[in-house]
Amino acid sequence: MACLYAAQGSLELRGEESSSVPQVFAKAAYVLDAKTGLTLYEKNADERRAVASTQKLLTALIVSERGELDQPVKVERTDLRVEPTRVGLKTGKEYLRGQLLQALLVKSGNDVARCLARDHSGGQDAFRPVMNAKARQLGMGDSHFVNAHGLTEKGQYSTARDMARLAFVAYRDKNIREAVAIAELEFSHSGWKEKLRNTNRLLRTLPFVTGMKTGFTNAAGRCLICSGRHGEREMIAVVLGSDSKHIWQDAETLIRWGLKVPEEEEPEDEGKKTSTAQSASSSS
């Protein structure tokens, strides 16, 4: 990927270019053109970091590319042995694979990630080499993944550049692109329904934001991979190692800059964006 701009802390800027580049609090960031893959901005792009639940995009890509999303998946007890965030899957219940994929990306359920990993490869340990093989295929040479959900484990890391490579490919996957755009998902359990609100707040507050995935752990800080569209322009911004005070502004600053959306173009009030999707019905 060719680079047009680099932020301070990554590469030295020259002359008037420095004044045009946005400044963000995040420890690492990356912006690329979602159509061409051209790099527009980078900050500490090759610094290895924990990326938390943003790595669920890799889990989702593996699941989506396998297909058969209309097939049932039965939840096993081992799928639930994980810390929150959880969607609340129930042992022995069946859900459609596509329904679980949506819940993974909308609500970031760690129980869903484990369920999909076990369903795909037969177990959590077996899914690990699948993730890393896919990462190598995508050119993510500075990444290593240990689990499907992104909770902190020794030896698990990625970079802003590698996560941008992942996001660029995931953005082209129809199932993922549709799922990350859902502001509120109607998730069907056995005999009752629950509305899952997307963890990406910008999806509800900025009309030009189209997805993609949030993440947080103490080790990773606040992370967000955000896609947007304005006119003919489509961009992806990766923000890693921010905090709760700055994460949303960091992402908005970068995506506005990449899309060339003027600051005077006011965002929608939260709640105005009413994109709601009903997931596939539970097969139990």
Image (cartoon, helix red, strand yellow):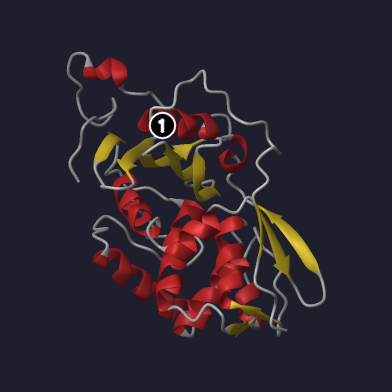
The answer to whether residue 237 is visible is yes
Q: Nearer the viewer, residue 252 or 272?
A: 272
* Residue 132 x/y as whole percent: 32, 68
* Residue 124 x/y as whole percent: 48, 77
Q: Nearer the viewer, residue 266 or 14?
A: 266
* Label 1 element class: helix
Residue 271 in the image: above or below residue 61: above
* Residue 15 x/y as whole percent: 18, 14
Quadrant in which the C terminus is drawn: bottom right
Disc 1 marks which residue? 254
Residue 185 in the image: above or below residue 215: below
Q: Residue at x 68, y 45 (%)?
A: 274
Q: Residue at x 37, y 47 (%)?
A: 49
Using a 10 Å C-alpha cutoff, classify the residue at mark 1 as few (fewer than 14 neighbours), some (14 to 19) or many (20 or more): many
Q: Amino acid at mark 1?
A: Leu
Locate residue 188: give its quadrant. Answer: bottom right
Locate residue 254: give its quadrant. Answer: top left
* Residue 198 x/y as whole percent: 63, 51
Q: Residue at x 60, y 54 (%)?
A: 182
Q: In the image, 27: left or right of 180?
A: left
The answer to whether residue 222 is visible is no
Q: In the image, 199: left or right of 14?
A: right
